[in-house]
Image (cartoon, coloured by chain):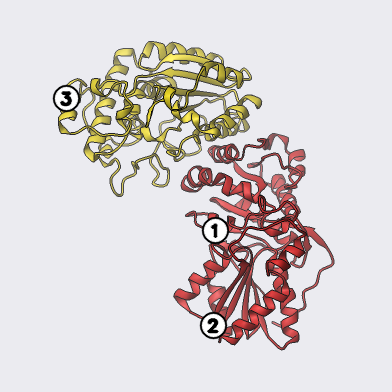
Amino acid sequence: MERKEYTYTEKKDTRSGFGDGLTELGKSNKNIVALCADLTGSLKMNDFKNNHPERFFQVGIAEANMMGLAAGLTIGGKIPFTGTFANFSTGRVYDQIRQSIAYSNKNVKICASHAGLTLGEDGATHQILEDIGMMKMLPGMTVINPCDYNQTKLATIALGDHIGPAYLRFGRPKWPIFTPENIKFQIGKGIKFLDGNDISIFATGHMLWQALEAEKILFSLGVSCEIINIHTIKPLDEEIILESIKKTKCAISCEEHNVIGGLGESISRLISEKSPVPFKVIGVNDSFGESGKPLDLLEKYNLNPESIKEAALQIIDKK
Amino acid sequence: MSKNIDELKNISSQVRRDIVRMVHQVQSGHPGGSLGCTDFLVYLFFNLMKRNDSFDMNGFNEDLFFLSNGHISPVFYSVLSRAGYFDKSELSTFRKLNSRLQGHPATHEGLPGIRVASGSLGQGLSVAVGSALAKKLNKEENIIYILMGDGELQEGQVWEAMMYAAHNKVDNIIATIDLNGQQIDGPVNEINSLLNLKDKLESFGWKVYESDGNDFESLSSTLEDAKKSLFSGYPIVNIMKTVMGKGVDFMENSHKWHGIPPNDEQLNDALKHIKETLGDY
């Protein structure tokens, strides 16, 4: 693979990718239903609501009930997509998801916006950094964190055909669009963005763009990075990870999540069991977030390209 | 074909035997609420519900039942088995390793009759209302039944679901509350009182019926009446008084038998008063 410098011409929020994907699904599959807990505009679910009012359920500020309703709707062949902020999609309703959805193996798609630090000014009450951990620990739960508008739209559409409980995590800020709009999204299959020899960088969600920006700096320093997008945290694409570190012999992971419980921890377990190499998890270092602008927050919490570059150089030194 | 009251009493007697034998055998489980709700579940499965012969998770074109207070699994399993969902011999596996009859109902082993896991309280009404919405989308004119405990009403999610169902005119559902007045730590009135439950439910927009859950005539007249009020723009709730531990005199009316099994002597004492009518498992 020849090195490509990723650029973008447009920024768009990943939540709009979800909303547009849901609109398409609604047209093609009459069993798709959507539920929202008083955040229709924020989740970009208005198109679905307007096109299919009979299949849209406004549940008000009652997320626990929303999860139960969704579980019940599957009994009768419906495919419910729930929409609210990531915090209220997970921590607030963990037991409802655990018992009525995951343990009961219900075909519910939990769609969660405003995940991570980059929701910005609303601050730590809303900036959940533990959701990937909570969701991946549930047996049978698929966990997906797409990286841009296009990938979020494609992931949403792919979930229409997926059977079983799933958690789809996306965000609020306008973010570069740098992935193609007309490819098939394969749940559980990582995507190689750049071939490299010196280090593997595994990134999920908004952090893939940060990793690609870091790669540009590293390339200028003569470091050859392999950039791999792990959009599906569970089930983890073990093959693409192990194949990459076999070549590069070291790696870092990048996510907008606590370093405890996220993608990095999953990769860490995999490589410590099957192919130990120097490895570092880039994420929020076991703290809550705070108010601020998205890019300022990423910088303060060491999730910016400069921090990724520094971490990469340190890990390469340990080889 | 619907059963007469003597036939229903016979089934209840056998179910009560099943319950005390199951919890005794494994020295674990919840006999009190199970015995109290026996007559209701027998009436529901043998007379009230329109059920398909074989179990399918989607339950198209049949009435559905959800158990929210999953700890009374002994009565649920016994009634499901006696209603033909699985062989009664499987009751002997209750709460044992590799059993489909988990301590609290679960779907993952595919036990026919179970549509959702329950045990963590307060979740069943939401699920039942969701399935009622699916029935409406599918244009099925079937009924959703759901049973909850009275102590369970202390869970906030129940009231979220109550508000939702009334506001959205979910009128194909009959919820039943087992008003036995007991919870693990003592009488409900001493732990966290429901005060005037009927007023509460009416103010939440539900049409309220009241019944004696240990009297088949009361169950029959109340629930048949309630059925006539379906599809009228409001959800229906049946406040059903029961005696916790009903049928086993030393267990009656005491929260102490919420989750305690009888010993050998107590089992023999209990079985002396409960007739074997359909053959023990």
Assess whether mark 3 and mark 1 are in contact (beta carbons under 8 angstroms): no
Determine if marks 1 and 2 fall on one subunit.
Answer: yes
Q: Which mark is residue A224?
A: none
* Residue with the mark numbered 3: B269
Q: Amino acid at mark 3?
A: Asp
Q: Is tag 1's residue or tag 2's residue first in the polypeptide sequence?
A: 1
Chain that is yellow in the image: B
Q: Check if mark 3's residue and mark 2's residue have beta carbons within 8 Å.
A: no
Q: Is residue A69 above or below residue A8?
A: above
Q: CA distance from mark 3 to mark 2?
A: 70 Å
Query: In terms of secondary structure, where does tag 2 sit?
Result: helix
Percent coordinates x, y for residue A97 in the rendering: 53, 46
Q: Residue at x 58, y 17 (%)?
A: B202
Q: Secondary structure at mark 3?
A: helix
Chain A: its colour in the image is: red
**Percent x, y of residue A105:** 49, 47
Could you tell me which residue is drawn at 45 percent across and 25 percent down? B150
Residue occupying the point 68% across, 75% down: A308
Density class for disc 2 (Cα within 10 Å; few <14, some 14-19, many ≥20) is some
Quadrant in which the C terminus of chain B appears: top left
Q: Chain of mark 3?
A: B
Q: Amino acid at mark 1?
A: Gly
Mark 1 highlights which residue?
A: A133
On-image quarter of the N terminus of chain B: top left
Q: Which numbered tag is attached to residue A246? A: 2
Chain at tag 1: A
Query: Residue A246 placed where, x, y %?
Result: 54, 82
Vertical order, B257 against A203 (above or below): above
Counting the numbered discs, the total is 3
Is B161 on the left or on the right of A152, as rendered? Answer: left
Q: Give the residue type that dot 2 points to.
A: Lys
Q: Is residue B153 left or right of residue A302?
A: left
